[in-house]
Image (tube, rainbow, N blue to C red):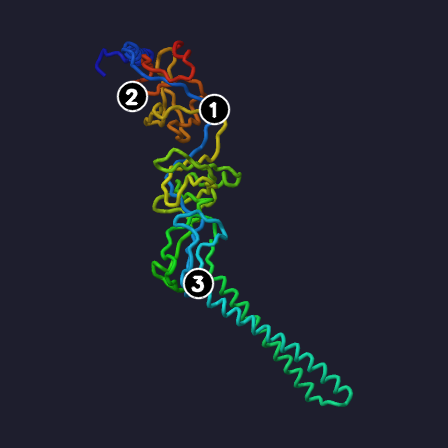
Amino acid sequence: MLPGARTPSPSSAQGSSGGAANSRQAAIAARPPVPVDIDTAQRGPMPLRVDAVGMALPVATVAIKTRIDAQIDKIFVADGALVRQGDILVKLDSRQIEAQIKQTEANIAKDTIQIESAVRDVNRLSELLAKGAGTQLNVDNARTTLAAGRATLAADQALLDNQTVQLSWYTLSAPITGHVGTFAAKAGNIVRSGDNTATGVLATIVQTTPIYVAFSVPQIVLPAIREAIAEGSGEVRATPQGGTKSATGKVAVVDNTIDAATGTIMLRAIFNNPDDTLWPGQLCNVRVTLRTDPDVVSIPRTATQSGQDGNFVYIVENGVARVRPVKVGRFQDGRDIITEGLKGGETIVSDGGLLLVDGVRVDVRRSTQADASKKGAI
């Protein structure tokens, strides 16, 4: 230190820093007002939603194939028709198996008559043996003939049961309710069992009521999804792309593995779909409402800014912008859910905040506040 120089006192140093701060505040206050848009921090219920793109999938798909070689006699439904479970689709030429059934029924009738005759022989020979006029050998032979007749009847009855089952194969019915596709073969064509070509499948039925919609969501919402399923909630709304009508369902299936490459998990929602709003293979915009938080503070996404110390917003007090640190919980429907920093009801800057600093005056260009009277009070 040079001789004669004076050391500045602490009070003079504080005075100089305070003067600098006052000068800065004065400079900020002297700036012209910054034009901004304002809004209100809203407090109230806010749903937790997840949006995704999904695809409608049938709950069941059944390929109609023949189990025997035969000629198509008649097709009872049109291509693309809606069929109910049990409806007859195709009738095959069954004259041969019907003739075989008649032959077997005739054999059963003959077996029955022979058994009746054998029973009479056993009774008659047994009486003669008891009177000493017959032999045990004749009785034993009659009983053997009776047993053989009963065995023959049982075999013919089993054959009839088998042929009756085979006869049912000549009538192809719908095992499920759904829409049938295009028939690969028409009346008069020969169909064969075990045909693995394109013509081997006569038609395909897809179930559309109910119907699945499969979609993926980030793994971070998996706990909320499982909680919603346990509580019986988890409403899902699916809107076909290009359409305006939506269907409402619920989450039915959660995949057992998270995709490590994308960090997502596949879900399936089920819809009653009585009017076929959803169609198999159709892309849909899906919105899942997992729960509704009853009391949260939310602000427009454009109001939230990021700095070195985290997120913050500008609130407007007496025409002056003030910095307010906040913590953002999540983003929903264009709004940030604020967990700390705001109580609700504060006037915030929703647009124009990039030109603001703490303490600068603002000029309201547009107010989107629910209560328009607040605008005049600023």
Please state, as top left, top right, bottom left or bottom right, where the N terminus lies in the image. Answer: top left
Q: Secondary structure at mark 2?
A: helix
Nearer to us: label 2 or label 1: 1
**The disc label shown at residue 354, or none:** 2
The residue nearer to you, when weighing 263 against 50, is 50
Q: Which amino acid, by three-letter code, is at mark 1?
A: Gly
Is disc 2 in contact with disc 1, using a CB cutoff of under 8 Å?
no
Task: Identify the residue at image location x=38%, y=21%.
Answer: 324
Please state, as top left, top right, bottom left or bottom right, where the C terminus lies in the image. Answer: top left
Whether residue 9 appears in this view of the structure is no
Q: Which amino acid, by three-letter code, is at mark 3?
A: Asp
Task: Identify the residue at image location x=49%, y=26%.
Answer: 295
Q: Which amino acid, by three-letter code, is at mark 2?
A: Leu
The residue most toward the left is 2
Which of disc 3 and disc 2 is earlier in sequence?
A: 3
Whether residue 179 appears in this view of the structure is yes
Q: Which residue is mark 3?
A: 93
Label 2, label 3: how many angstroms apart (C-alpha)? 82 Å
Q: Which residue is mark 1?
A: 44
- Quick check: 120 above or below 190? below
Nearer to us: label 1 or label 3: 3
Label 2, label 1: how many angstroms apart (C-alpha)? 28 Å
Task: Identify the residue at image location x=49%, y=38%.
Answer: 228
Q: Secondary structure at mark 3?
A: loop
**The disc label shown at residue 310, or none:** none
Which of disc 3 and disc 1 is earlier in sequence?
A: 1
Where is residue 18 shown, x and y percent of the image? 32, 12
Label 1, label 3: how many angstroms apart (C-alpha)? 70 Å
